[in-house]
Image (tube, rainbow, N blue to C red):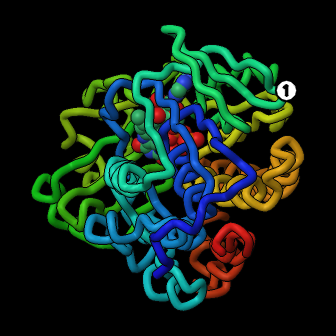
């Protein structure tokens, strides 16, 4: 367990501003505090509300939660699925089972967790609220940024509040408005796929699915994932379908009848499961037509604002955690020149997020195959040695923060 007490204050940096108090923003504040750097988190929302459904946190993420002192606030609320079970959505046959749980912990020295996204966010928030070097300003909708190329950067809110700091980290999420305003970044465009999510109390889940593994059901142009969260008291569900209409937030309600209408051709057990939630939320899977520049003077993008990834490797939130560690390390190591430090951060992240984005996109293609290609995929899954398959993800789960960030 990493120490949670802050080191002495970093004399070179007075304060870093962070636009967005989501997973990436709060993790950045905590990683900075571990390096003695003060920050102000500027969050648009007045209160944190509907905070999603499930989130999987691989060892590359749980290792970071430990380093920034969050583990104690979340460990009682997570589950540690022992395996990933892949099933055919049409007939409920198991296609393959790959190890997570103990295998991951032994191989990577950190656990593989599944959590309610709200529990992860609450844990980050509770840790941050106890940290004297972190100030959280709710209801601060950053609409303008000044002096990014000067000696102090300013952030101004919609109601004319102002904050000043040595650097500004922009972590305002996948629908980032600051990405286009400050970095001339592209607006996200729709991939043609939408995701629906729900959380079901365990007693509402069909008995046959009271299982601790992550389940991944594959069908033509569709996949469904579910796993236990909230210490096993609930199951988080997400289904990804092709769809024409676009929504531009995380929380649009979705009719259960619409979801059920997408499940024709599914095995009865899966249809039954998907018919149970009363409340679904839906979001559109977006991509950026080109990569935005990551840094402008003393400002830098982080997390989904920098690189929204498709959720086919369950790594969007974890990439934001990794970014947080790297940017905090870079700023703390080079306090006299924040603009240079942010360039160091951007260079350190570029290859990895590109690789992750490619791997995630490819997974999506494989998941949604149909016809003979799907049959070939299923045969390949059946023949694959589980151990070897999981080792092919060492590059992903074995990532450790730069040494400096955890000192
Ligand atoms: C409500 C919500 C529900 C989600 N549900 C899921 C889910 O069910 N499954 C899943 O896989 N992923 C979900 N995600 C996305 C996933 O959590 C992100 O991929 C991951 O958290 C990346 O972190 P981030 O910090 O980059 O962005 P986010 O966690 O999205 O945080 C962005 C934050 O910035 C704030 N913000 C936006 N604009 C401004 C502004 N101008 N000024 C100040 N603050 C601003 C937002 O209110 C938000 O708190 C959800 C995100 C949110 C916000």
Mark 1 CB near ligand 1 (8 Å cut): no
For label 1, the residue is: 150
* Image vertical order of residue 360 relative to residue 68, above or below: above
Residue 110 pos. (x, y %): 52, 80
Instruction: Judge whether residue 225 can be spotted in this image.
Output: no
117 sits left or right of 376 in the view: left
- Residue placed furthest toward the left: 203
Residue lying at 24% horizontally and 67% vertically, measured from the top left = 231
Residue 130 pos. (x, y %): 36, 55
Is the C terminus in the top left, top right, bottom left or bottom right quadrant?
A: bottom right
Q: Nearer the viewer, residue 178 or 351?
A: 178
Residue lying at 50% horizontally and 75% vertically, measured from the top left = 96
Residue lying at 30% horizontally and 33% vertically, measured from the top left = 49
Label 1 element class: loop
Residue 136 pos. (x, y %): 44, 38
- Residue placed furthest toward the top: 159
* Image vertical order of residue 37 relative to residue 239, above or below: below
Q: Quadrant of residue 190?
A: top right
358 sits left or right of 227 in the view: right
333 sits left or right of 280 in the view: right
118 sits left or right of 57 in the view: left
Q: Nearer the viewer, residue 115 or 218?
A: 115
Q: Quadrant of residue 173?
A: top right
Residue lying at 48% horizontally and 22% vertically, measured from the top left = 140
Instruction: Judge whether residue 335 can be spotted in this image.
Output: yes
- Residue placed furthest toward the front: 11
Q: Nearer the viewer, residue 94 or 309?
A: 309
Mark 1 closeness class: few <14, some 14–19, many ≥20 residues within 10 Å: few
């Amino acid at each position: 367990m990493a120490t949670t007490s802050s080191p002495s204050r970093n004399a070179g940096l007075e304060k870093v501003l962070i636009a967005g108090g989501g997973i990436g923003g709060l993790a950045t504040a905590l990683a900075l505090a571990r390096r003695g750097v003060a920050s102000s988190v500027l969050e648009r929302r007045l209160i944190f509300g509907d905070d999603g459904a499930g989130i999987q946190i691989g060892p590359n993420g749980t290792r970071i939660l430990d380093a920034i002192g969050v583990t104690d606030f979340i460990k009682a609320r997570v589950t540690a699925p022992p395996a990933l079970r892949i099933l055919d959505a049409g007939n409920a046959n198991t296609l393959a089972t790959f190890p997570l749980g103990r295998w991951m912990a032994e191989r990577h020295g950190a656990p593989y967790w599944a959590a309610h996204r709200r529990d992860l966010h609450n844990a980050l928030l509770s840790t941050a609220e106890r940290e004297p070097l972190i100030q959280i300003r709710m209801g601060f909708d950053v609409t303008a940024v000044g002096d990014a190329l000067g000696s102090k950067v300013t952030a101004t809110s919609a109601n004319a509040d102002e904050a000043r700091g040595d650097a500004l980290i922009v972590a305002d999420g996948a629908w980032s408005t600051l990405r286009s305003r400050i970095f001339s970044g592209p607006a996200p465009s729709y991939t043609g796929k939408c995701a629906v999510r729900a959380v079901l109390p365990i007693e509402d889940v069909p008995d046959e699915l009271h299982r601790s593994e992550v389940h991944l059901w594959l069908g033509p142009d569709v996949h469904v994932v579910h796993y236990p969260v909230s210490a096993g008291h609930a199951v988080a569900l997400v289904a990804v379908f092709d769809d024409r209409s676009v929504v531009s937030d995380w929380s649009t309600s979705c009719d259960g009848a619409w979801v059920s209408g997408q499940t024709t051709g599914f095995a009865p057990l899966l249809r039954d499961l998907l018919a149970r939630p009363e409340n679904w939320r839906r979001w559109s899977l977006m991509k950026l037509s080109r990569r935005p520049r990551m840094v402008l003077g003393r400002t830098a993008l982080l997390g989904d604002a920098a690189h929204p990834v498709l959720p086919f490797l369950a790594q969007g939130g974890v990439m934001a955690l990794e970014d947080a560690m790297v940017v905090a390390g870079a700023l703390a190591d080079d306090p006299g020149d924040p603009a240079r430090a942010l360039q160091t951060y951007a260079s350190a992240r570029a290859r990895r997020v590109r690789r992750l984005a490619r791997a995630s996109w490819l997974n999506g293609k494989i998941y949604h195959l149909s016809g003979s290609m799907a049959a070939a995929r299923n045969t390949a899954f059946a023949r694959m040695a589980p151990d070897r398959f999981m080792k092919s993800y060492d590059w992903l789960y074995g990532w450790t923060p730069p040494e400096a960030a955890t000192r």
